[in-house]
Image (spheres, rainbow, N blue to C red):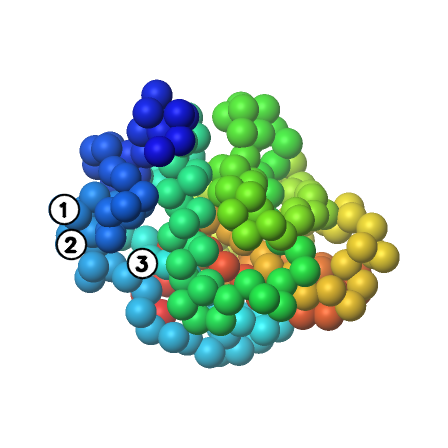
């Protein structure tokens, strides 16, 4: 056992109980694993149905119940330790449906600089860092969110009314992503508009393919 695990043992992100990597249900405890079974995103959806420019779409859970409560704590209460178990959910989803073999780079949907300053961390970047450490795939910070666009559904404009608005910019180097296969990560899929916009930016700037992976989907039609 690692020394860090003795001092700060891994915990189930849904209830906070101590878990171990030897548990078959890790990173969830057995109780939460059983409760969360019905929320597993087990429908293999053709990405072209909703995300026409994505090569593939990976999702771990439906955005309901205990997971939804945990994500809210993670995003708004500073529970950064949840990034590691959340990264494992995404890794498992990708490996179940395809794997990382063809992924050259990881990138992510960022929060705005205003939101970053308020929270002190970017919740999706923290998850991507853990995926990168686990799989040995480098991260490209190549997308920037417009400070004038809302970061969550509590803003005055809801997501549906923002579908046609451009809220992201490409700030990377075109030669870095040219002819590369990119895995774009976000925390929650709501309408799909953000994934679509960021995918378009990556493809327009030279990416060979873009696949997307999210922790959970809130779409009712999935």
| Percent of width and height locating residue 19 | 25, 38
| Percent of width and height locating residue 24 | 24, 53
Question: In the figure, is residue 220 to the left or right of 195?
Answer: left
Disc 2 to disc 1: CB gap under 8 Å: yes
Identified at 80% across, 63% down, the residue is: 178
**Residue that numbered label 2 is attached to:** 34
- In this rendering, is residue 203 above or below 174? below
Question: In the figure, is residue 24 to the left or right of 104?
Answer: left
| Of labels 1 and 3, the one closer to you | 1
Observer-nearest of 146 and 74: 74
**Residue that numbered label 1 is attached to:** 31
**Residue that numbered label 3 is attached to:** 62
SS type, badge 2? helix
Question: In the figure, is residue 93 to the left or right of 185?
Answer: left
- In this rendering, is residue 19 above or below 119? below
Location of residue 3 (image quadrant): top left
N-term-proximal mark, 1 vs 3: 1
């Amino acid at each position: 056992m690692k020394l860090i695990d003795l001092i700060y043992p891994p915990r189930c992100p849904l209830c906070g109980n101590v878990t171990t990597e030897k548990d078959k249900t890790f990173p969830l405890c057995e109780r939460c694993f059983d409760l969360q079974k019905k929320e597993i995103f087990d429908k293999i959806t053709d990405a072209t149905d909703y995300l026409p420019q994505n090569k593939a779409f990976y999702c771990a859970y439906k955005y309901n119940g205990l997971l939804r409560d945990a994500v809210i704590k993670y995003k708004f209460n500073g529970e950064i330790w949840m990034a590691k178990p959340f990264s494992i959910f995404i890794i498992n989803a990708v490996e179940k449906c395809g794997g990382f073999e063809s992924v050259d780079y990881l990138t992510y949907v960022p929060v705005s600089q205003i939101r970053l300053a308020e929270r002190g961390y970017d919740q999706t970047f923290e998850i991507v860092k853990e995926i990168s450490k686990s799989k040995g795939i480098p991260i490209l910070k190549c997308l920037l969110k417009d400070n004038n666009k809302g970061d969550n559904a509590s803003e005055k404009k809801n997501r549906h009314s923002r579908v046609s608005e451009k809220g992201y910019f490409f700030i990377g180097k075109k030669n870095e992503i040219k002819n590369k296969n990119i895995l774009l990560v976000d925390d929650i899929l709501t309408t799909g508009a953000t994934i679509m916009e960021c995918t378009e930016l990556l493809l327009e700037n030279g990416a060979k393919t873009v696949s997307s992976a999210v922790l959970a989907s809130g779409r009712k039609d999935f």
